[in-house]
Every structure is written in structure tokens, then in C-alpha cells.
Image (cartoon, rainbow, N blue to C red):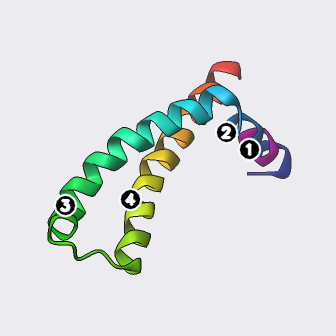
Amino acid sequence: MGLPAMRRWLQTATTGPVVRRALKFAVVVGAILICINHGDAILSGNVDSTRIAKMVLTVFVPYAVSTASSVAALIERDS
């Protein structure tokens, strides 16, 4: 991916609709994944800084997937 393509990708990824859609997916899917992957630790009160970092990454993954998917679809549509 050349510099112009990367610039286009980043500009598209930071548009309001793409960011809002990704945030919605991150909150919903991230919450579900946190419950599945960390629910027992949360309920037992066994949450330390390492686990919190893992939870943040758990929310970031659906954000990144949604963003990448939206950007790819928009760029393909406009090409």
C-alpha cells in the first residue's frame, strides 16, 4: 500500500460515520467478549492492571475489525 492509498485509508477510517459505527460495535461486542473472557474474574473481584489491559484490548479488537471492514467497503464502493 503506497502513501496515497494509506492516506486515503486513514482519512476514511477517521470519518464520523465510520468511527461511530465502530464505537457501537466495540461497545456491544466488547462487552459480550469481556463477560465471556473475564466474567469469572470480575465476579470474584480478581481484577488487576494486567486484566484491565486485556479488557481494553478486548474492546479494541471489534473496533479495529469494524473500522477495517467499513473502510474496505467504502473504498471498494468508490473505486
| Amino acid found under the numbered disc labelled 1 | Leu
Callout in the foreground (4, 3): 3
Which class describes the residues within 10 Å of circle 3: few (<14), some (14-19), or many (20+)?
A: some
Rendered image quadrant of residue 4? top right
| Amino acid found under the numbered disc labelled 3 | Gly
Measure the alpha-carbon separation of dots 1 and 4: 22 Å
Q: Which residues are magenta?
A: 6-10
Q: Cβ–Cβ below 8 Å for labels 4 and 3?
A: no
Q: Nearer the viewer, residue 65 or 58?
A: 58
Callout in the foreground (1, 4): 4
The residue tagged 3 is 39
Q: In this rendering, is residue 53 above or below 24? A: below
> Which of marks 2 and 3 precedes in the sequence?
2
Badge 4 element: helix
The residue tagged 4 is 58
Q: Residue at x 21, y 72 (%)?
A: 45
Rendered image quadrant of residue 61? bottom left
The residue tagged 1 is 10
